[in-house]
Amino acid sequence: MPRQTLTQKIIARRLALGLTWAEIAEKIGHSTVYTTAALLGQMTLDAGEADIVAKLLDLDPEEARLLTTVPYKGSLGEAVPTDPLVYRFYEIVQVYGTTLKEVIQEEFGDGIMSAIDFTMNVERKADPKGDRVVVTLDGKFLPYKKY
Amino acid sequence: MPRQTLTQKIIARRLALGLTWAEIAEKIGHSTVYTTAALLGQMTLDAGEADIVAKLLDLDPEEARLLTTVPYKGSLGEAVPTDPLVYRFYEIVQVYGTTLKEVIQEEFGDGIMSAIDFTMNVERKADPKGDRVVVTLDGKFLPYKKY
Amino acid sequence: MPRQTLTQKIIARRLALGLTWAEIAEKIGHSTVYTTAALLGQMTLDAGEADIVAKLLDLDPEEARLLTTVPYKGSLGEAVPTDPLVYRFYEIVQVYGTTLKEVIQEEFGDGIMSAIDFTMNVERKADPKGDRVVVTLDGKFLPYKKY
Amino acid sequence: MPRQTLTQKIIARRLALGLTWAEIAEKIGHSTVYTTAALLGQMTLDAGEADIVAKLLDLDPEEARLLTTVPYKGSLGEAVPTDPLVYRFYEIVQVYGTTLKEVIQEEFGDGIMSAIDFTMNVERKADPKGDRVVVTLDGKFLPYKKY
Amino acid sequence: MPRQTLTQKIIARRLALGLTWAEIAEKIGHSTVYTTAALLGQMTLDAGEADIVAKLLDLDPEEARLLTTVPYKGSLGEAVPTDPLVYRFYEIVQVYGTTLKEVIQEEFGDGIMSAIDFTMNVERKADPKGDRVVVTLDGKFLPYKKY
Amino acid sequence: MPRQTLTQKIIARRLALGLTWAEIAEKIGHSTVYTTAALLGQMTLDAGEADIVAKLLDLDPEEARLLTTVPYKGSLGEAVPTDPLVYRFYEIVQVYGTTLKEVIQEEFGDGIMSAIDFTMNVERKADPKGDRVVVTLDGKFLPYKKY
Amino acid sequence: MPRQTLTQKIIARRLALGLTWAEIAEKIGHSTVYTTAALLGQMTLDAGEADIVAKLLDLDPEEARLLTTVPYKGSLGEAVPTDPLVYRFYEIVQVYGTTLKEVIQEEFGDGIMSAIDFTMNVERKADPKGDRVVVTLDGKFLPYKKY
Amino acid sequence: MPRQTLTQKIIARRLALGLTWAEIAEKIGHSTVYTTAALLGQMTLDAGEADIVAKLLDLDPEEARLLTTVPYKGSLGEAVPTDPLVYRFYEIVQVYGTTLKEVIQEEFGDGIMSAIDFTMNVERKADPKGDRVVVTLDGKFLPYKKY
Amino acid sequence: MPRQTLTQKIIARRLALGLTWAEIAEKIGHSTVYTTAALLGQMTLDAGEADIVAKLLDLDPEEARLLTTVPYKGSLGEAVPTDPLVYRFYEIVQVYGTTLKEVIQEEFGDGIMSAIDFTMNVERKADPKGDRVVVTLDGKFLPYKKY
Amino acid sequence: MPRQTLTQKIIARRLALGLTWAEIAEKIGHSTVYTTAALLGQMTLDAGEADIVAKLLDLDPEEARLLTTVPYKGSLGEAVPTDPLVYRFYEIVQVYGTTLKEVIQEEFGDGIMSAIDFTMNVERKADPKGDRVVVTLDGKFLPYKKY
């Protein structure tokens, strides 16, 4: 079973059962973002976590095992996303890419923000003019070293 | 004078004068991120702000005026960035794109996080295992409306 | 069931039943454009609307539920559309893109026309030299804010 | 002199002189959209119109003549626009492309909306919740003929 | 049934029955080019014509109905065709594209040759040095109008 | 001097002198299409023809010599043309590509229409409903041979 | 049955039966290169040849007939081949493309080496330092003609 | 001086002096193909050879030195060549790519034809039906080794 | 059976059986890297090795035979890999590509490091600050030869 | 001065002065690989190192300062390198990409080899059958963390 097929099955089961990503996340004890990414085929679970998910979503053992293996990552299937919600994040990279580079390197020197030693959080911030989405990216700074 | 030429001149002047983006930002009273984006040709300044920048960086009046006009945005010049620091942000969109879609829509319904009614902040978070870059994206949720 | 499969089924059922998009739109009380977009997998319906559609087109409950979920948007499957009708709209963006930017920003300042807080209408305008298609795009202006 | 160089010169002159596109349009008696498109290298002017523009913007006779020749059209220089204002129009084609096809063909049969026998208008619509941009596309329907 | 599936079935049936495109065209009373394009999923037939084709090729009623609907056009599935016969036509556009633009606009002014109000004919021209393919493109000139 | 620079100079000179492509073609005794293609850097002239052109357009000897050398062909600088006039020809290849393949091969067998042993002609055809552009492509059929 | 399916079946049958391309070629009396290309869906066989192949590889009549029809050519499914053996030939075009153009045109004038009136041969050349692959391309020179 | 500038200068000088590639090749004692490739920025010469070329084409010492350095190879500047002569070679790779793979591997096993330990020769073959271009590619077979 | 299907089956079987790549490699007596590449459809095994693998993973004879045939190589299915682990290797080529060229050619002259007469090894290097991945690429230098 | 201009100047100076990358590296006390990468615009030097280089290559102070700033990285200017030496490394990523993923993850779990906390070394290994290039990539393993 290719991972994409499992991802589609999980999406359908979750929908049919009326479960939220947040509820599944709570059951396995990780953040909603990490849990959702794992179930969408981008992160891995350990065997115990996969079992919990398998029970919740009625997956069989082979499918549970697949959740514990490392997937080939990249969720979009296209270089520039067409979905408007996802595109806005791409647009931020396009418009602010060189700004992020300048500002981070002014503060830290030559290096990068890790996307591996990394957590992401999504929150709703109430606002009378319209609630806001607050996404926090938190990654270790990794300096280039001379050698 | 094309905007890119001005951007390159600003980068060179800033370097020659030893000014930081944060110092320039403080002079014109905006955040470092916004100020840097404006000087890299992605956002606009008003006439007063442009004058302050022009004095700091020894730009002529035509160049100051250019800083007040709306640029054709997109800082990368390529669909997939090759610079490792910038790529990591693209990678986050690739790996977490569908996750962001699921998590935001579960909370807010069908719509997007605005990249226009939007602020971004970059901070250093001290950490004994290595300091971290924390980037906060804060955009208004815009719901699709039926009609 | 992937959304595309449902979209193809809806197209086939509509054809077999001889229903127009306008008739379906009238049943659920939205505009023809919005309704068509929702049934082609680009917008969402609520449960009541989805039920009406399911009855009209003989869809099963799982399919009706799928109509209430937010799809991954982007209807073309290619960056530059090959279909002549759709291409003409792409051509307008290519030829008039910078014009739209100049004219809108001259009137409104730096910002965009929202494609989310947005409605679209398509009408036939009688003309003795050949009837005309009139497409009206109506989106909220969203200004960039300084921060 | 390549057309792009003239376009950049016109943009700079207009800025230096503080002229709006609307003012230039009024002088030559065309709509703001058409006039802007012509000056951005997408449409043509006749000799008299080009002279008026040349006087307004202090262009020399060779440049005026260039305004009367048919340019190689396409204003973006990239298949998918990176500028957020322009991208929103591309997004509308991506999200609503198949919808436009279905709705126009349901009304008119197989054919297209002409992008040549075509006018476009941009207007501000006052709205207490935020003014709106209204773009009207008006093109002759051209039916495919059997042969 | 997706249109492509029908196209493949038509190609196979025609082959199995030993029918030529010209023979089918004669039965429905259109040119060979138009008829072939319609059966390859690029043009539409009316109900009567579709019935004739359905009988000839033993298609069922749903398939006949599909022939009367407007397909999403674009027969190649790639931007630059790899098939040598089709590529030669692309090569003509590449090599002679700017020539066609200059020559047509010198004669007609700013505008295009319509690809909608358009007929195409393919003929064999006997030649002792090797017979020749003569393709005639005949499209209405559509002038850009000022507005 | 790169060929493109010469092409731009020729375009400018022709414009300044008010010469048509047809007039230049008549002077050197070739068709308008061939002559225009040669002067736009796609075909070659012999020394005598190049001299005539050089005198007409006031080119220097090095430039005349360049007209006699074989250019790197391809006039568009992009895979899919953005100019509407040129795009229509690309669209014809996209929509009718498989049709041309079927119709030509039904008549001639496996092979191609040559784009080298090839002539092209552009004519105006008067029509009360609007004059028409008639483009005739005439290429030798080249059969694949078994070996 | 799409041609690709037949190609895959032929590859599998040949493998299971332990037949070489050279043996099949000998049976139908063509070169190994031509025969292999035909069986990989790039060239055509006549009915008699197809029958021989069908018997050798146990294909049914519909499949044999498919071998006699002209396929949509292009064997790679990608613009730049990833397979190292095939890539080396692409590399030769990349590195030596302009050299081939100069050398052939110096000898022959403006024109091309035909890829249609063309044969290709592959041979092993014994060499004590390691045997060599010798590929001979032999195509008729086709001159551009003035018109 | 970038290598491309030198390449263009060499092309212009050769033309002005009326030298053929074959004549230059003879002077430095290499084949015409190798010599042309070296002068077009794809291969290297040693100091003595570069001096001979510099004298022939009146290049200065810095330019001669550049001819002895290893260039960044790739002569086309595009993935799919638009020039018809060069495209035909690309077409051969597209149409015969999988055939070359099968035929070479049937003879030699898993490996490639080297494009480095490689020579290429171009010859004219007289033919009453039209002279032919014969291109011979001769590369060492390099087997994959197990490890 | 297409090779990709076999690759997916092998991945699934290995997972179900809890076998490591290293264990399979040991059974057939090749390195882990070579063995993994062969089982992922990039290298070939001989009949004896394929039998061992078939027994270990319960493959049928046709599948074993497929492992002995030369696959169409290229494991990614995309020009720029989206998976972060694989992308890092692409990034190294992007950032260090010209450096590798300069350093290798300074030492060896004009030529390449073979990717065919080549071995690769992956090792874990213990490090108190975090273990390291050490990848060793070892390829024969192949010099360009003059001819 | 854009960084690329400096890079080209450094390449030219080094050539004119007959300095090797290894000699420059020795002067500033870093490895040849790191030094070369820095001078080709991919890594940074500190002020003291930049001064040494400036003296060696006769650069002016502004140029020395540019060597201390962080460049926008990516040395190729194209997604798939055309230069054969560089391409071989791309080919290794294409052919062995999934193998590297499997082998590293089997040993280390889900994560990546860092391309930042990373060193690379290039060495010549004498071999009677032809010397070999040995490239060693040494990067810290960075595990994905759950959160």
Image: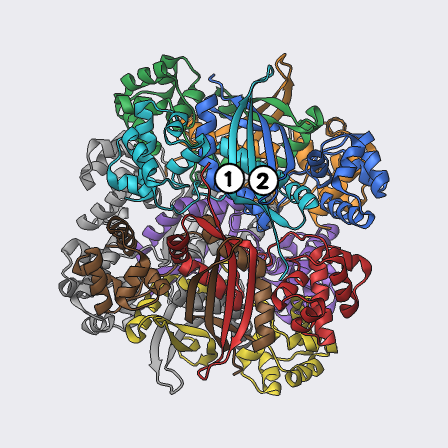
Chain colours: A yellow, C purple, E orange, F green, G blue, H cyan, I red, J brown
User: Of residues A33 and I89, which is closer to you in this image?
Assistant: I89
Q: Pointer 2 indicates a residue of which chain?
A: H
Task: Categorize mark 1 by other alpha carbons within 10 Å: few (<14), some (14-19), many (20+).
Answer: many
The image quadrant of residue A98 is bottom left
Query: Which residue sits at x=29%, y=22%?
Result: F18
Q: Pointer 1 indicates a residue of which chain?
A: G
Q: Secondary structure at mark 2?
A: helix
Residue I77's x, y, as percent? 59, 56
Residues tagged 2 and 1 counted as in contact (Cβ below 8 A)? yes
User: Of residues G19 and I6, which is closer to you in this image?
Assistant: G19
User: Which residue is labeled 1 in the image?
Assistant: G93
Looking at the rendered structure, the kind of residue marked 2 is Val
User: Which residue is labeled 2 in the image?
Assistant: H93
Left or right of E131 in this view: G101: left
Residue F120's x, y, as percent? 51, 22
- Residue that extends furthest to the front in the rendered view of this protein: J128
Q: Say whether residue E56 is visible.
A: no
Q: Say whether residue I59 is visible.
A: yes
Residue C54's x, y, as percent? 71, 64
Query: Which residue sits at x=29%, y=34%?
Result: H54
